[in-house]
Image (spheres, grey):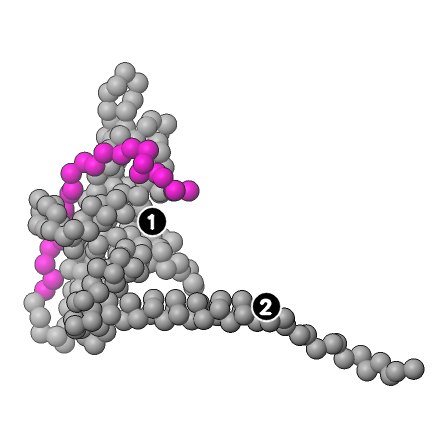
Amino acid sequence: MAENTGAPPERVWSAPALAVLCITGALLLGGTGMFLGAVFLHVAPANALSREYRDEVDGLVYPEFEQNWKLFAPNPLQQNISLSARVRTVVDGGATRTHDWIGLTAQDMAAVRGNPAPSHADQNLLRRAWDFYDGSHGGQDGALSNPRGKLAEEYLKRIALQRIGRTADGDRILEIQFRAVTTPVAPPAWSGDGPAGAPQSRELGWWPVNDEDYRGLV
């Protein structure tokens, strides 16, 4: 009678299973490498390769993976931007009502303060959305200065609508407006720089809201 050592039998993979595992691993490694390479080209100084594939790199990075730093010259933020939104709704009889401002940045800050592991979305999603919008629209008139400007508008609007919902006080939302208050960060005393300037407020125009703006939102 053969002695039972208790050792589990060695697992033997079939040739098709090994082939699937190898191909899947190669695809995952290749995709990861391509993504990291695209992000590197996005943050690296301009070069022949990044200029040649600019459209492909931008299509992958924007808007979810956009970076606000440069690989070899990081620049800390020098101003705080507080973003608010308000909506206009349709009430009985077809009249409209303009609601009070909602502090979107204040909501994020309230979620971050006192949280030992704050969400990356609470810290950066809204701020980066505004940076994306501001970088694609020129001046106070909000004119498009970048082909990605319409995407930036839709991105910012959908972030706000996801928080506000489809109605306000039971009435259907017709339009939304944004206001950004920019407050310069005071320089340290040892820097010798002058005092920080006064806060500046910027109000955008009213944007229409329709069912398509809620597509895919929870």
Instruction: Name the quadrant containing residue 14.
Output: bottom right
In front of the other: 108 or 218: 218
Residue 47 in view of the camera: yes
Instruction: Name the quadrant containing residue 103.
Output: top left
* Furthest residue toward top: 93
Q: Position of residue 8 (x, y in %)?
A: 75, 76
Task: Note whether 157 is above or below 59 in the view shown.
Answer: above
Magenta residue span: 195-218
Q: According to the image, label 1 marks what residue?
A: 107
Q: Amino acid at mark 1?
A: Gln
Q: According to the image, label 2 marks what residue?
A: 17
Q: Amino acid at mark 2?
A: Ala
Q: Earlier in the sequence, mark 2 or mark 1?
A: 2
Q: Residue drawn at (21%, 76%), measured in percent from left and top?
A: 72
Q: Position of residue 122 (x, y in %)?
A: 35, 55
Task: Note whether 51 is above or below 9 in the view shown.
Answer: above
Q: CA distance from mark 2 to mark 1?
A: 50 Å
Q: Residue drawn at (30%, 50%), measured in percent from left and top?
A: 106
